[in-house]
Amino acid sequence: MTSSEIEACPSWRARPLHSQWMQAERFALWFPLTVFFVTRAVNAVMFALASGRQIAIPFTGLGGKLAIDSPASPDYWVVASNWDGRWYGVIATYGYPDHLPLDSAGQVLQNAYAFPPLYPMLTRFLMLTTGLDFTRAGPIVSLVCGAGAMVLVYRLVADSAGRRAGALTVVLVCTFMSAPVFQMCYSEGLTLLLVSGSLTLLSRRRYALLACALLLLSLTRPVGSAVVLVVLVHGLMRYRNRSREHFSLRDRLWVLGVAGFGTLLAGLWPLCVALMTGEGDAYLNSMAAWTQDRSSRALSVWPVALWQLGGFLGLLALLLLVMAITWLVRRPGARQWTVEVRAWAWAYPLYLLFVTGPAPSTIRHGVLAFPLLWPFVERTKGTDRRAQLGFALALAAVGLVAQWVWINDYVVVTTRADSTFP
């Protein structure tokens, strides 16, 4: 073999190092993890800078709103355990109470039963196995779950819309305003991991494992009903396309069974609370204690609240938001998503409309709507591609600024509220 023949033979040429790292399987792992941990490091710096504004928080008892004692200007770990993290800390450290706390008028006070057990129990397991306290174990659990979720989110989008769409989706999720919650003592990281895992299992038709994922999700956050809607859409589309792809009776029964099982799971945690307290309506009363008017959420909450806040303009803003989501999901480019991802893009906002109301937590809830954080997943070339990339990077830059605002103004505790801490 001549030297020219050797040079022409691919087996004799060393593969460029960058091409090895850009292989689909490698890229699908290292890219989402790199983006996730780099943005979390940036947020850690933001936490450190903003923590100097936090006031001292005294121990207020197990029934208090903030049961973890901390000094003024605490370290990162304490700030990352603020707000709901303090409730999760009580559960992970002491467990749930055996009765509902009541005020002098006999009304149920805010209590730990509003928080399902999977996230605090995972944190408790880490505490017992490592000796870490909650303020360190909680953020570690959140980070691990969030990292796994980013890998699954990337694959969900990239498998149908391509590598660039998956990469930009990960970047926009990691730079979303409330993405710092993935390193705090909150269940969003675990929830997104289970949601993206459920959508992955559904798209691959692993229905038995999907049922297990829904069981875990019901013990994490009550968003399983939105996943059930996605399961039904999945089944409907398989039925409509049965002439092109066989939809067996066995699979039909699995889809209906999983949807029914997921619907029943909505009552699992309320049933557990009833058994632990001996009161059938304990969970509903606990959730009502977190609303200003002590009422359950309903579809009317958003329109009424926005009417009170801004009158006609408030209702118009809600209408425009609904129209924008509808357009984003129905536009031709959205067909690049899988049926499951596209269904989640509208099912989750619909869930929020029915069961939540306007509150600071709405920003935090938005991070789970990952398809809508970068909905422009259609494939482009040339100038359009550069414009799309520039727009995505501009949104990411705005998101990083918004993250500082969220950490500085929402996460850090700076004042008392009604003689207690919110």
Image (tube, rainbow, N blue to C red):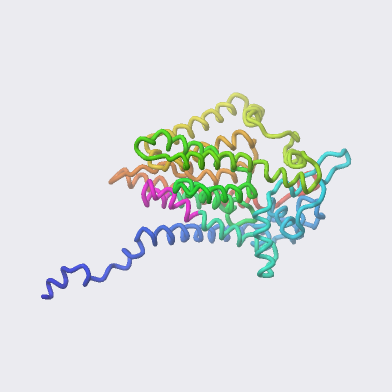
Majority SS type along the magenta span: helix
Rendered residue at 49%/60% (across/down): 38
Quadrant housing residue 30: bottom left
Quadrant housing residue 365: top right
Magenta-drawn segment: 150-168
The residue lying toward the viewer, choosing from 163 and 307, is 163
Rendered residue at 83%/46% (across/down): 101
Q: How many marks?
A: 0
Q: Position of residue 141 (x, y in %)?
A: 61, 60
Is residue 348 visible from the viewing direction of this image? no
The residue lying toward the viewer, choosing from 247 and 312, is 247
Rendered residue at 64%/27% (across/down): 307
- Residue sitting farthest toward the top: 312
Decide whether residue 154 is among the magenta residues: yes
Q: Position of residue 336 (x, y in %)?
A: 38, 42
The residue lying toward the viewer, choosing from 405 and 338, is 338
| Relative horizontal placement of residue 359, taking residue 246 as reference (left or right) | right
Q: Position of residue 314 (x, y in %)?
A: 59, 28
Q: Position of residue 43 (x, y in %)?
A: 56, 57
Please say if 91 is above or below 384: below
Quadrant housing residue 91: bottom right
- Residue sitting farthest toward the right: 104
Decide whether residue 103 is among the magenta residues: no
The residue lying toward the viewer, choosing from 75 and 103, is 103
